[in-house]
Amino acid sequence: MNLARLDPRVKLLILAGLSTAALVSRSYTTLLALLAISLIILLAGSIAPITIWMKLRGLFSLIVALFVLQCLFNRSGEPLLAFTKFTLITQAGFKTAAAISLRLLVILLAALIVTTGEARDYLLSLTTMKVPYEVAFMVLTALRFLPMMREEAQDVLCAAQLRGLQIKKAGLKRQVGAYSKIIIPIVAGAVRRAEDFSIAMEARGFRAHPQRTTMRKLRMRASDWLYLAVFCAIISSIEAIAAIAAFT
Amino acid sequence: MIEVNNVAFTYPHTKKQIFSNYSIVFERNEITAVTGNNGAGKTTLSKLLVGILRPDAGSIVIDGADIGRMDLCAIGKKVGYVFQNPDRQLFNDTVYNEVAFGLYIMKLPNDEIEQKASHYLSLFGLTQYRDAFPGKLSHGEKQRLALAAVLALGADYLVLDEPTTGLDIRRQRELGNLLENLRSGHGCGIILITHSNEFSSCYASKRVVIAQ
C-alpha cells in the first residue's frame, strides 16, 4: 500500500511498534526480521531503494562509527580477532556492536516511514490521540526547523572557510575550537527566529480560544485498519517466536 | 578573470535544474551586475563561483586555476563572498574580531591588523560598535560589518549577494563609491547579485540577466 495514502496515525503506530520491538529484542534473528519488515514496508509503499539510500547515507557513517567503537572498546568475552598477544575484537564486543547497529538501522528505517506524510497530518493525528495541541505543534515546529538550522550551519562553516579558517586539515583541538565558534551564530539565529515566530503566532491568534476546530477530519479506512492489524500480527508473532526460542 | 564554462547544476533534493550548459566570463577591473527574477539562479551562480556549490558538469576557472580542485580556503584567497543574509557569516564575539578574523589567519603583524580593521570599521561607520556582539546589531549594520570583514581581506574578486539590502540611500552610495574605488584602485573584479536596477545602472559597467 502506498505509504503516502496511509493514515498518519497508523504510520506513527508502526514507528512506535518497530522502534520498541528493536529496543527490546535480544536476538539477531529478531532484529534481522524487523529490519526486513521495515524494508518491505518502505519498498511496498512506493519508496525507491535509491531514495532510502540517499536519506540514510549521511547517517551511515554514524552507524559504522558506532559499530567500530563498540567492537574496539567492549573487551569482554573470548577473542575473535587477535594480533600476536593483543586482542583486537572480542566475540561479545562484535555481538554487541552488531546488535546496536541493527537496532539503530531499524529505528532509522521506521522513521523514514513517517517522512512520507505531511507535517499538518501528524499534528492532526497527535491531537486526535489526545496529545495537547501546543505540545504537538512545538514538536513538529522544532522538527521543521532542523533542516533550516543545518543549512545555516553549512553556510556559516563555508563563510569561515572562505575567510581562511582551515577545518578539514586542522587537528582535533583546533577543529573543536572552530566548531564551537560557529555554534554561536547558529544558536543566536535559532533563538531570534523562535522569538520572531512566537510573536507572529500570537499576532495570528494562537491560543486565543481554548477550543480549536479543524477543517479536516482524519478517518481510519478499512484498509488502514487492515494494514495495522497485519503489522501488529507480524510483530507479535516475531516477538512470541523469539520469546519461545529464548525460553527453550 | 573568472570563466564559467558549460556549467550544469541541479539541486539534488528538489531535482530543480538551475543551469544547463551555462557559460559566462567575469573580468577583473570591472563591476558586473547579475540580475534576474526570484528563483532564476542568481544566488546559485554566486555560490558556484566561490565553491560553496559544486557544478554537476563543466568547470569554473579563476585566473587559470580550476576551482574544482581547490578547497574553500584556497578559493577564499582569490574571491571574497558576502552572503545575502549577513547572519550567516558573522560568527565572532565582537565587531572588531569579526573584521580582524581573516587578518589573524593571514598572520599579519598585530599593528597592521589593528590599522586595517580600524580603517574598515571607520569606513563602514562601525567604530562605535567595536566591542559589541555582532548579533546585537541592526540588519543594515550587520550587512556593513559583513562587507567590512570580507573587503579587509583584499581578495582579487568580490561576489556580493544583494549587498544593498538593509542599507539606506547614503550607505548605498558610499558602498557604490567604495566598490568603484576597489575596481579602479586595485583592479578588483566585482560581481554584484542585485535586484536594484538603480544601484546596478549607477555602478556596474556590465549587466547580466539570468533568464529562468
Image (cartoon, coloured by chain):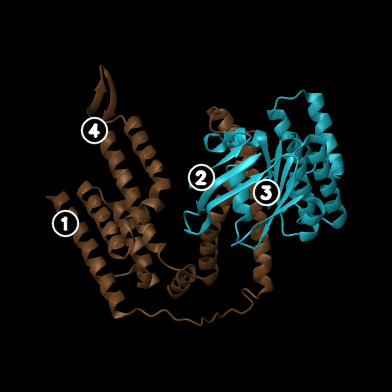
| For residue A44, above or below residue A246 | below
Measuring from the top left, give residue B57's x and y in whole percent.
48, 46
Q: What residue is at 70 percent from the left and 33 percent from the top?
A: B102
Q: Amino acid at mark 3?
A: Phe
Say which chain is brown.
A
- To the question of a shared chain for discs 2 and 3, the answer is yes
- To the question of a shared chain for discs 2 and 4, the answer is no
Q: Relative to residue A121, is residue B72 drawn left or right?
A: right
Instruction: Tell us which disc is closer to us: 1 or 3.
Output: 3
- To the question of a shared chain for discs 1 and 3, the answer is no
Mark positioned earlier in the residue sequence (4 or 1): 4
Determine if residue A101 is in view: yes
Location of mark 2 (residue): B58
Residue B83: which disc? 3
Q: Amino acid at mark 1?
A: Ile
CA–CA distance in space, label 4 to label 1: 25 Å
Q: Relative to residue B117, is residue A137 drawn left or right?
A: left
Measuring from the top left, give residue B42's x and y in whole percent.
63, 55
Which image quadrant is residue A100 in? top left
Measuring from the top left, give residue A198's x and y in whole percent.
65, 65
Location of mark 4 (residue): A91
Say which chain is cyan.
B
CA–CA distance in space, label 1 to label 3: 58 Å
Measuring from the top left, give residue A207's x and y in whole percent.
61, 74
For the residue pair A59 and B57, the one nearer the viewer reads as B57
CA–CA distance in space, label 3 to label 4: 52 Å
Location of mark 1 (residue): A241
For the residue pair B165 and B3, the one nearer the viewer reads as B3
